[in-house]
Each structure stands twice: as structure tokens, then as C-alpha cells.
Image (tube, rainbow, N blue to C red):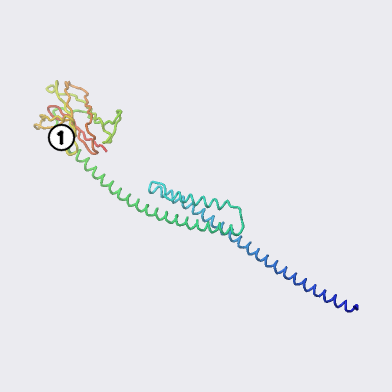
Amino acid sequence: MSNIKRMRIYGILATLLLILSAGFGYAFWNKSLGLSRENQKIAAEMQALELEKTGLVMRLDSLTASYNNLRTENEDLKGREASTVALIAEKDAAIKKIKSQNRRNLENLRKQVADLTRIRIEYETIVSTLRAENDQLREENQRLTGENEQLRGENTNLSGKMDKLAKQLEEQIRQTQSARFKASSFRVEVERRHDKLTARAKKARTMIVSFDLADVPEPYQGAQKLYLAVTNDKGHPIAAANPIKTTIQAPTGPVSIVAQQVKQVALNNTQRLSFTYKIDENLKAGNYVVAIYCESGLLGVASLRLA
């Protein structure tokens, strides 16, 4: 074979090798370019997912703060723990778990963002529902407060009228039944158990009435019966195991009374006396008139209010 022929063959082979080399190089370059673009796409998506996850976590942190404020308000409005506490605790545990995950591959990030999105929607629903319930409870409490204020005003007005009736009854008894001499330093106290004073009707156990009798006219000195009579503001005697019905001779004429207790005393010119009466039944809240009589009329009277 001539040199010229060999040179042609070598030239053809070199050309073919060059073409193959160029083809392989292009294919490799094209594949590398595709992989680079795919990696860039994945990196961009992961970055976007990271930003979305961060935004969701911040939104959920804000929702947590809102929920805690609303829950406290809800408990104050209705006096008991909000029914959503257990549900929110479950959501918070799931959020904490997602925050702590360190894996940063694309599939894992997608799942984290999807889970956080679902929890955010559920959280927003709970917060919205709780806010609406609080608004409703607040309106109801305001309505009840208005009604209570109205009732309180009516009760105050009624109590004032009852106090006035008791005072009128006290004054009427004083004017029509007073004896020729009167008690001074007239004091009425009500005790509950253990000798402690009270103004509560349900706790009243003992009534103590103390008074002074000074400058007793001589015709009235000596043996006398003194009577303790307690009535409500309508003039009805309070309950007693052994009520004492008697008639006293007041300056204005005979007066029939019902007493709860009687005491035999020997009156001098001046003395300090008292009655201690064990209440037989629980008294109802209201006004009472407490009077002390002798056989010749009323010695002293006072009205008493028990709540």
C-alpha cells in the first residue's frame, strides 16, 4: 500500500475519531447541563419550601399567642377551662415535632409544609370559633350584668321599703304601747355558733337583747314580769317552741302580745338587764322588730335587719 493511501486512511480514521469525540463531548455536556438545571430547580424549590415553612411557623406562633389570649378570656367569661385545650395541645406537639426535623430533602420538606398548612387551617378554625364564642359570651354576660343591676336596684328599693315598714311598726308600737318608764341603751345583737356576731339570717342562732332601766317609778319597783317579743316587719311573731300569749296594761289600754320569752325580775331604781334567746327556727332574711314589755306596757323597741 502506498504512502498516499495510508495517509488517506489515517485521515479518515482521525476524522471519524474527531467526530465521535465531538459527539460524546456534546452528549456529556448536554447531560451535565440537564443535571445542573434539575439541581438548580430542586434547590430553588427547596429554598421556596424553606421560606414557606418559615412563614407557616411564624403564622402558627402568632395563632398560638392569639389562642392563649382567647382561651384565658373564654375561661374568665364562663368560669371553666376552654374545651379546645386538649386539641390545641395535640396541634402544638405536632408543630414542635416538625420544627425539630433536620432532614432537608425535597420530599421531606414538601411533607412538612403540607402538614404545617393543614395544622394552620385547623388552628385558624379553632381560633375563629373561640373568638366567636367569646363575643357571644361577652354579650350574654353584659346582658346578665344589666339584668342583675336592674334587679339589684329593685331589691335595694324593696329593701328600703321594708326598712321603712319596720321603722314605722317600731314607731307605732312605741307611741301606742309605751309604759310610764322606758329602757335606755337598748341593744339587740344576733350571734351564730361559737359566740360570734352575725347579720346573716341563716346563721343566726341566739338573740341577745340588753338595756338599762333607770329612774323606775316607785309604784313599778319590785316583782315584775318582763317579756321578749320578736315579730317580722308585718307584725307576725317569729316561731317559738312555747309562745307566751298575754295582755299588758299599756297607758292607752290593754294590748295582747305573743312573746317568745318571759323573765321574772325584781326591779329597783336602776339596773342593767338582758335577755338571751335561743332561736328555735332558722330566720328568713328580712326585717324584724324586737320589743321588751313589762306588765304595764312597752319598755323598749328596735328594728333589726338580717340578710
Is residue 47 toward the left or the right of residue 188 in the image?
A: right
| Quadrant housing residue 216 | top left
Q: For the point 12% across and 27% down, which residue is it?
A: 295
- Which residue type does callout 1 highlight? Ile
Is 237 rendered above or below residue 270?
Answer: below
- Image x and y of residue 288, in percent: 21, 36
Mark 1 burial class by Cα count in 10 Å: few <14, some 14-19, many 20+: some
Depicted 235 relative to depicted 150: above or below: above
Residue at numbered disc 1:
173
Residue displayed at 30% across by 50% down = 147
Q: Nearer the viewer, residue 87 or 68?
A: 87
* Left or right of residue 160: residue 126: right
SS assignment at label 1: helix
Q: How many marks?
A: 1
Where residue 297 sits: x, y (%)?
A: 13, 29
Q: Is residue 125 above or below residue 201?
A: below
Q: Residue furthest right?
A: 2
Tell me which residue sits at (23%, 38%) in the image.
284
In the visual, does 143 lie left or right of 294?
right
Towards the viewer: 25 or 12: 12
Task: Residue lying at the far left in this picture: please name it.
Answer: 253
What percent of the width, then of the height, locates residue 7?
87, 77
Quarter of the rendering occupied by the C terminus: top left
Name above or below for residue 261 compared with residue 96: above
- Comparing 165 with 212, the one in front is 165
Q: Nearer the viewer, residue 295 or 239?
A: 239
Looking at the figure, which quarter contains the N terminus?
Answer: bottom right
Name of the residue lying farthest toward the front:
1
Q: Position of residue 91 (x, y in %)?
A: 49, 52
